[in-house]
Amino acid sequence: MTAARAFLIACGEPAVSAALAAFEAARFSGLPVERVLLPGGCWWLAEAASAGRLKRIIASRSAALDGVSAMISGDSVSEVALLGHQDCHWYHDRAPAAGPGELVRRIGQDLYIARDEILRVAGRALTVTGHVLIRRAGAEFTPRQLFPE
């Protein structure tokens, strides 16, 4: 039997690295954490999940989905945390005309889509939480939990 561990999927922008480390320490106190850090974080899973059938077959070969599938296929992962952040350059580059509120809304929407895709791939009961790092005074980020509510 493998020891329980957590799985964190987030954006790897340097601007949020300190907030990401603080989130991980607070959320998973003492639990080993596997990280997948990609530009845009859960955007990749949401894209794969939202694709049409042919595009989905192609997207299912993506490194992001392969990595997630491998990590959650066993029973040792006890929780998956999905983490997005305000001011994400990946989202801004995809929707440059969108305002800050719209970008956070899109990030939140993708977190929900990614959650559903993870549960589909896992094929088992699994705790999946979704969070957005919101910028407070200065450069500080505070996590806001979207789900479970």
Image (cartoon, rainbow, N blue to C red):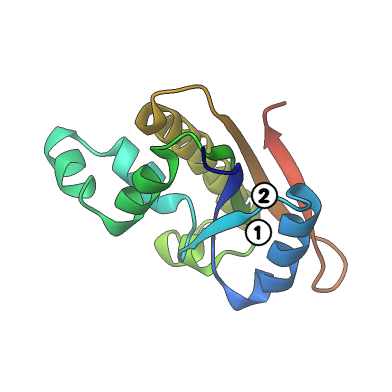
Q: Residue at x 76, y 48 (%)?
A: 27
Position above or below: 116 against 79: above
Which mark is drawn over residue 109? none
Sequence-wise first label, 1 or 2: 1
Q: Residue at x 54, y 40 (%)?
A: 77
The C terminus lies in which quarter of the figure? top right
Residue 33 picture location, percent across and down:
61, 55
Q: Is residue 63 left or right of residue 120?
A: left
- Say few, some or many: other residues with alpha carbon within 10 Å of mark 1 (under 14 / 14 to 19 / 20 or more): some
- Which residue is at the front of the view, 7 or 85? 7
Among all residues in the image, which is located at the extreme left?
54
Residue 1 picture location, percent across and down:
51, 37
- Say few, some or many: other residues with alpha carbon within 10 Å of mark 2 (under 14 / 14 to 19 / 20 or more): many
Q: Residue at x 15, y 47 (%)?
A: 58
Position above or below: 69 against 18: above
Estimate the spatial distance between the alpha carbons at disc 1 and disc 2, rounded to whole Å.
7 Å
Among all residues in the image, which is located at the extreme front?
1
Number of marks present in the image shown: 2
- Which amino acid does the dot numbered 2 rest on? Val
- Which amino acid does the dot numbered 1 rest on? Gln
Labels 1 & 2 near each other (Cβ < 8 A): yes
Which mark is drawn over residue 132? 2
Q: Is residue 134 left or right of residue 10?
A: right
Residue 57 picture quarter: top left
Q: Residue at x 51, y 22 (%)?
A: 125
The mark lying in front, picked from 1 and 2, is 2
Residue 3 picture location, percent across and down:
59, 44
Can residue 134 be seen by looking at this rendering? no
- Which residue is at the front of the view, 89 or 96? 89
Which mark is drawn over residue 86? 1
Task: Label 2, secondary structure: give it.
Answer: strand
